[in-house]
Image (cartoon, grey):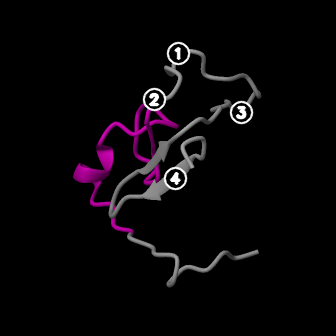
Amino acid sequence: MADDATIRTKKNGTLTVKGPVRLEGADGEPWTDVPEGANVALCRCGLSKVKPFCDGSHNAGGFESAPTAGEQPYPW
């Protein structure tokens, strides 16, 4: 469906979010400068200087992770 959001785990990289989503900070306030409908790359390695967004630090940091749905079932 066109209105669904998709979150893709990139091999050794980000969580890429596509679709209509609302991104909120720890205080519950939304990021208002993220353009509506924009694809968002979220940090997964913890090394980004612009968290929660990815700045590419995973490349130099040697981050390795490529989970798949079959290998990593939902833990709850």
Check disc 1 and report the residue beneath it: 33
Q: How far apart are labels 3 and 4 at the CA level?
A: 20 Å
Evaluate if marks 3 and 4 touch, with contact meaning CB atoms under 8 Å apart.
Answer: no
Which comes before the other along the chain, label 4 or label 1? Answer: 4
Disc 1/disc 3 C-alpha distance (Å): 16 Å
Give the label, 1 or 3, closer to the camera: 1
- Residue at which label 3 appears: 26
Name the one closer to the observer, 7 or 56: 7
**What is the three-letter code of the residue carrying label 2?**
Ala
Whether the residues at callouts 4 and 1 have beta carbons within 8 Å, the answer is no
* Residue 16 x/y as whole percent: 44, 47
Question: Residue 57: x, y in percent?
Answer: 31, 44
First in sequence, mark 2 or 4: give its number. 4
Looking at the rendering, the stretch of residues picked out in magenta corresponds to 38-65
Q: Position of residue 36 (x, y in %)?
A: 53, 22
Q: Secondary structure at mark 2?
A: loop
Label 1's element?
Answer: loop
Could you tell me how far apart the alpha carbons at marks 1 and 2 are, in whole angstroms? 10 Å
Q: Is residue 73 above or below residue 40?
A: below
**Dot 2 corresponds to which residue?**
38
Which of the 4 quarters of the picture holds residue 41?
top left
Q: Is residue 30 left or right of residue 33?
A: right
Seen from the viewer's position, the closer of residues 22 and 46 is 22
Residue at the extreme top of the image, as rendered: 33
Dot 4 corresponds to which residue?
7
